[in-house]
Amino acid sequence: MSLKVYNTLTRKKEEFVPRDKGKVSMYVCGPTVYNYIHIGNARCYVAFDVIYRYLKYRGYDVVYVRNLTDVDDKIINRANKEGLSTKEIAEKYIEAFHEDTKNIGNESPQIEPRATEHINDMIKTIKCLIENGFAYEIDGDVFFEVQKFDNYGKLSGRTLEEMRAGERVDVDERKRYPMDFALWKSSKPGEPSWDSPWGKGRPGWHIECSVMSSKYLGMGFDIHGGGHDLIFPHHENEIAQAEASAGKAPFVKYWLHNGFVNISDEKMAKSLGNVILVREILKEYEPNVLRMFFLSTHYRSPISYSKGNLDSVAVALERIENTIQRIDYLLYKSEEIAGTSASEIEEFREIIEGVEEKFIDAMDDDFNTASALGVIFDFVKETNLFLEESQKNLSKKNRDLLRPARDKLVKLTGVLGIKLREKEIAGELPDELLDLAKNIVGQEFGEKDAALSALTGAREKAREERDWVKADLIRNKLASIGFALKDTPQGCQITFERK
Ligand SMILES: [Zn+2]
């Protein structure tokens, strides 16, 4: 199967054919740096980080550009509120943005252009739009004339009349049509400004993205991403500006948009006061948990945030990590006995060999991370069944499959940017195991892992006999020397961390 992506522009899933064979050019709208990022922002950056990683995993040479909007009304307002300059505000929140996105495990894009460093390019494009008859200047402001661009509305699928009815537009009487939007804004005293043919001012938000994306990626680049809320007007306007100034189409081949994050079934919005910052969540949850929470739903669908949902994800994540630890324990274990039956070994070998293809099938279907995680969890389940058998009947043949199974788990979760906590049982098990086994089981053991097996076996027997005091005693004694025992439907899981 080949990679298919849902294109907002055509409203269907299409086969992904990049402009240049083997290469992918991708642009994602970055933050306006006036505040810390919230989970709605984070979802977008994680979604496109996974898309970026997956394209690389599929062998594409990817150029990923994500801008920083460092001039905007919101930044000016924030600067006034915090008593800092707009530049100081931008620097402060750019640093915070980098911290937060790194903490949630995202890779950095290769190019991160800042709007304020591309003002001349924007002025050039605006001049070109005026010359081509798509824009007009009034009192130092420049507007794009939407009626001049035939395809205005092609991304959002709305006619000008529908947009007019659907949007509350502050009608600026000077505009030729209410939906005309600003390309250049004259500055008020004290605001950041640049010289231009229309006097001192600053660019509008939409022109930034058109100019910076086509500057680094050229016209007709492959993927333009962003949140669903950017389709209109931001991305609609980007298309109009880029195609009208270049005199050719398309500006972008595939438009990808991620869905909203809902909180208690309400859309998250500043006006509702239910904005949750990434750094607040990371005080309570591991970054992997937040990441896996996003990936547990397809990126285009809405997702419901709640602590309960994060808690369930944390438990699921632990399941993968426990499996890795169980493998590590058996890899360390030196004693080999009868071994699992040949057919079981063969069956598990096929499962290991087939898992990556299933993962690719899921991801090739418009980056369906929810299905891809399903594939990983099915694999964890199969691996646990095999581990059960191996714990009872460990042989070289069993052991030879454990390392490849472990490698697949680490590799596939890694493609999704989930970095598993790996605590390999390295070196010696603690000497105290021998004494403990002698005291509790009443038998001398030469090998420490045999002593451990005897102890967990004794605890199992105590539980069967409903001798909870003894079962707890064994658990607590083992805990005191670094072993954690956890009873799961798949059996007792043992993890070890050196004290
Ligand atoms: Zn943008």
Image: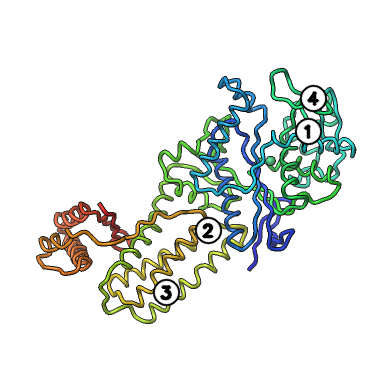
Earlier sequence position, callout 4 versus callout 3: 4
Q: Secondary structure at mark 2?
A: helix
467 in relation to 77, above or below: below
The secondary structure type at the circle numbered 1 is strand
Q: Quadrant of residue 486?
A: bottom left
For the residue carrying disc 4, how many other residues have a C-alpha within 10 Å: few (<14), some (14-19), or many (20+)? few
Q: Is residue 228 visible?
A: no
Task: Quickly name the residue at label 2.
Answer: 415
> Which residue, given by chain and number where applicable, does mark 4 sit on?
172
Q: Nearer the viewer, mark 4 or mark 2?
A: 2
Going from the N terminus, do you reach mark 2 or mark 3 first? Answer: 3
Specify whether tag 1 is near ligand 1 (CB below 8 Å): no
Task: Estimate the spatial distance between the alpha carbons at disc 4 and disc 2, rounded to whole Å.
Answer: 49 Å
| 3D distance between C-alphas at marks 2 and 3 | 22 Å
Q: CA distance from mark 3 to mark 1?
A: 61 Å
Q: According to the image, label 1 marks what residue? A: 183
* Residue behind mark 3: 348
Counting residues from the start of the chain, the first of labels 3 and 1 encountered is 1
Residue 448 figure quarter: bottom left
**Sequence-earlier tag: 1 or 4:** 4
Q: Is residue 315 left or right of residue 135?
A: left
Work out whether mark 1 precedes mark 2 in sequence or the reverse, and give the earlier one.
Answer: 1
Is 433 left, or right, of 64 in this rendering?
Answer: left
Which of the marked residues, 4 or 2, is nearer the chain's N terminus? 4
Question: Answer yes or no: do the residues labelled 4 and 2 have beta carbons within 8 Å?
Answer: no
Residue 130: give x, y in percent of width and height: 87, 35
The amino acid at mark 3 is Phe
Q: Nearer the viewer, residue 474 or 432?
A: 432
